[in-house]
Image (tube, rainbow, N blue to C red):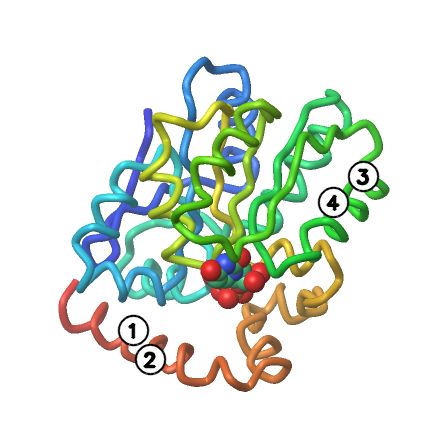
Amino acid sequence: MRKQVRILGVPIDMISQEEAFQKLVLFLEGSSIKKIYTPNPEIVMLAQEDQRLLKVIEGADLVLPDGIGLLIASKIKGLGLKERVTGVDTMDRLLNYCGDKKRSIYLLGGKPGTAEIACKNIEQQYPGIKIAGLHHGYFQEADENEIIADINAAAPDLLFVCLGAPKQEKWIDRYQDQLNCKIAMGVGGSVDIYAGTAKRAPVIFQKVGLEWFYRLMKEPWRMKRMMVLPKFLIQVIVKQ
Ligand code: UDP
């Protein structure tokens, strides 16, 4: 049975990293497309004002609690979220699985050239994996039919969509009935991490829940976006 909690009205699956992975493996054997999103507090805040985004998240097959802020909110309110389940860690496990089982992926997103480098690195890092296709994420609406045709011709098991949130979630939702893949997952800046143009925080920062702080030091322009975190926590305390 699927268990979800609502944080400021946004549904999040109550699931551990291991349970999420097992569920995703089952999804890979399924017959219809499954939509996976990995929201953080910033997206939860956006969904307060964007009803369409809220509906999109409600329509997901799995919503992973990415972002330490969601875990803090869960602790404050005793909601019982198990642990942080990041998009990039989950993607790593899925890529490993695809290597072992010779499954295929399609990588959509990132600046022109980035997905190519990411896919080369992924091929090296996860031997056996099939790169079914890739496309950068700076396309016009007029190009979308062509991109969907390319994805469908490649028929990947997994489609990773890296257009940034909430664009990627809305894109997956909009085209879900046209896409030929088992899993479509929004994984934001993961394409940059696999390409090596962005770095994850050292493990110690990840362990103590300060990955966001490391990212802020590396990309100070994120300050404005991150200021949403204290606002988020205040709303959780006041409203939830
Ligand atoms: N991106 C894209 N198309 C767009 C906007 C963004 O492909 O129209 C890519 C961008 O190049 C980056 C990723 O989406 O690789 C978003 O990264 P970010 O770290 O901002 O996303 P987050 O993980 O924070 O949602």
> Nearer the viewer's eye, disc 3 or disc 2?
3
Residue in the picture at 44% in, 50% down = 38
User: Looking at this view, is 102 or 62 the one in front?
Assistant: 102
Q: Which amino acid type is shown beneath numbered disc 2? A: Pro
Marks 3 and 2, Cα distance to the nearest angstrom?
40 Å
Residue in the picture at 69% in, 57% down = 114
Disc 3 marks which residue?
123
Q: Which amino acid type is shown beneath numbered disc 3? A: Glu
Marks 1 and 4, Cα distance to the nearest angstrom?
37 Å
Does the residue tagged 1 have its C-beta within 8 Å of any atom of ligand 1? no
Query: Could you say which disc has been placed on residue 230 in the image?
Result: 2
Residue in the picture at 46% in, 55% down = 66
Whole-percent x, y for residue 163 in the image? 49, 55
Q: Are marks 1 and 2 in contact (CB under 8 Å)?
A: yes
Disc 1 marks which residue?
233
User: Looking at this view, is 24 or 171 the one in front?
Assistant: 171
